[in-house]
Image (tube, rainbow, N blue to C red):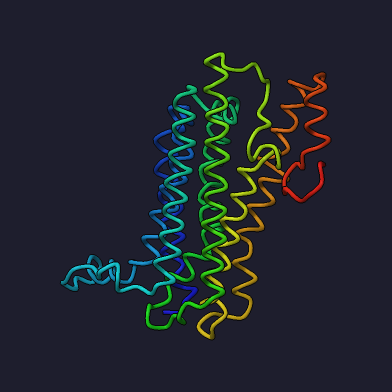
Amino acid sequence: MSVLSRLIPVATSAYALQTVLAMIFVPQQNEKYYDLGGAAGFMSTAFISLYYPFLRSKFLEGVPGPLPSIMSFAPRQLLLSAALGIWSLRLGSFLAYRAIKAGGDSRFDEVKKDPKRFAFFWFAQATWVMLVGLPVYMVNVLPAPLHPALGIRDYAAFGLFATSFLFEVIADRQKTAWRHAKNAKQHDEKFITRGLWSISRHPNYVGEVGIWTGIWALATGTLQTAHFPMGAVVLTAASPLLTWFLLRKVSGVPPLEKAGDKKFGGDPKWQEYKQTVPVFWPWGSVN
């Protein structure tokens, strides 16, 4: 079984899970668990990418014996799977909690009323799970003994992931604390300009792009070996590039900037904030 063909059951599991979730939540017009479903998709798909050969032998071919110990996998597989698991659990639970507490997710106010459109979003989420997590899944399907040892570049890549993860967490917590303080009448600021939000108007998104860049960079040590076809490194670069594109150009920055302009457009402080704080990269432009 070739390395790439081993991705077929991985992709199947990703779409199967989102199909089941769509069958449950589309009729209910319930979007509160959409992000949690995405997190579950990443974690279950990573598990399948690691364990599918053993699951197939045990449950489809009837080969007796326990599943292998987690420590039987290569260090790179463990680091990547742990990074994906930590990220998905943290972000998925954070977004789900926010949606449940708010009584819904405004992104789906109109979409959920149309069953076909709402179902499309669940299937699109499966595609997102596969494309963004592809570096991890491709590394995981390669048998452990075939992986090269970790080197300085790999530790630097994991450091980028860890730093970016911390950057995103801090940004989210700063905004949550700011919102709680506002609700408690401790300040009357209309929008946050403190902490990391003073060096980027969307620091949480900056952290997100850094997370997937670090994961991809860590995966390349295995993907550039002879066990993978030429172009595997470039193909999996779709992970950080798609993340950047969606956040910077589609569903992240544009609607938030538009909403901010609509709500605070006449406020001189908002105009000053937009003219002095970069829209995305802390070292980038304001537009």
- Residue drawn 47% across the image and 45% down it: 38
Residue 214 locus on image (x, y percent): 57, 62
- Residue drawn 36% across the image and 60% down it: 47
Image quadrant where residue 267 sits = top right
Q: Nearer the viewer, residue 176 or 47?
A: 176
Q: Is residue 245 above or below residue 31?
A: below
Q: Nearer the viewer, residue 181 or 265?
A: 181
Q: Nearer the viewer, residue 196 or 79?
A: 196
Residue 202 locus on image (x, y percent): 67, 40
| Left or right for 286, reference 216 | right
- Residue drawn 60% across the image and 26% down it: 110
Q: Quadrant of the C terminus?
A: top right
Residue 207 locus on image (x, y percent): 60, 49
Q: Is residue 279 above or below residue 161?
A: above
Q: Quadrant of the N terminus?
A: bottom left
- Residue drawn 56% across the image and 57% down it: 132
| Left or right for 266, reference 25 | right
The residue most toward the top is 185
| Left or right for 194, reference 34 | right
Image quadrant where residue 96 sits = top left
Q: Is residue 123 above or below residue 156?
A: above
